[in-house]
Image (cartoon, rainbow, N blue to C red):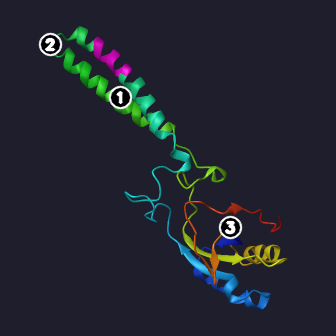
């Protein structure tokens, strides 16, 4: 596996400036490449569409939705039981309706309560935390002494989301890039 550094750019013009500078900075064309990452969720990695069943921040939402449905349904049943006692004929219908409405509201609240911003350090292919889309420049830093220089260049030319990764690198292209797993973030100082 090749050692890589990568950065995201707000626009293609910034990325092109870095690409023009890299040969002057002693990088061969086979050591760097430009690629585009689509917006999160639009890479069709999951069989039914999208990139994953749930991202890292929402992986527990199903459990909390089920708990919320149970609590909401029980509360609705209690309200419905009071209505059933007060309205003998329509009470059964009111009890069933209150139970259903309570379960629905509880599941909605539970699902929302189980959703948070994802932590990139906990990202996996099954539960990703995707970075914003846009142009990226990846630089292979297998040659000794090139990593710190490449990181400094990415920062100098305005890259954001600068990170380290390992991957299959051939002739200026990151062949096994997966948009669902972001590179390991690098402090903007540029050193290890």
Disc with the residue nearer the chain's start (1 vs 3): 1
Q: Is residue 161 left or right of residue 156?
A: left
Please give the range of residues in magenta. 74-82
Q: Read off the residue under disc 1.
A: 103
In this rendering, is residue 175 above or below 113? Answer: below
Mark 1 in CB contact with mark 3 (< 8 angstroms): no
Q: Main secondary structure of the magenta part?
A: helix
- Picture quadrant where residue 79 is located: top left
Q: Residues within 10 Å of mark 1 (few under 14, many from 20)?
A: many
Q: How many marks?
A: 3
Q: Which mark is residue 89?
A: 2
Q: Residues within 10 Å of mark 3 (few under 14, many from 20)?
A: some
Q: Which residue is mark 3?
A: 166
Indicate the position of residue 180 as horizontal and vertical percent values: 55, 60
Q: Position of residue 187 (x, y in %)?
A: 77, 62
Q: Residue at x 52, y 52 (%)?
A: 126
Q: In the rendered image, is residue 177 in sight?
A: yes
Judge whether 86 appears above or below 143 on screen: above
Q: Is residue 161 visible?
A: no
Disc 2 versus disc 3: distance between alpha carbons?
Answer: 69 Å
| Marks 1 & 2, CB-CB < 8 Å contact | no
Q: Residue at x 58, y 62 (%)?
A: 131
Above or below for 24 versus 167? below
* Disc number placed over residue 160 in the picture, else none: none
């Amino acid at each position: 596996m090749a050692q890589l550094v990568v950065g995201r750019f707000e626009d293609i013009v910034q990325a092109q400036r870095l690409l023009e500078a890299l040969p002057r900075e002693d990088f061969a064309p086979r050591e760097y490449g430009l690629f585009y990452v689509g917006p999160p969720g639009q890479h069709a990695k999951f069989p039914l569409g999208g990139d994953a069943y749930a991202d890292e921040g929402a992986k527990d939402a199903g459990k909390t939705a089920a708990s919320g449905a149970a609590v909401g349904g029980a509360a609705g049943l209690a309200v419905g039981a009071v209505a059933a006692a007060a309205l003998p004929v329509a009470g059964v219908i009111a009890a069933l309706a209150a139970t259903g409405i309570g379960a629905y509201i509880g599941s909605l609240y539970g699902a929302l309560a189980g959703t948070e911003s994802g932590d990139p350090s906990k990202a996996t292919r099954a539960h990703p935390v995707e970075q914003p889309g846009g142009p990226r420049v990846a630089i292979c830093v297998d040659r000794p002494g090139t990593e710190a220089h490449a990181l400094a260049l990415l920062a100098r030319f305005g890259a954001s989301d600068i990170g380290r990764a390992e991957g299959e690198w051939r002739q200026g292209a990151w062949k096994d890039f997966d948009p669902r797993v972001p590179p390991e973030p690098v402090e903007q100082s540029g050193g290890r």
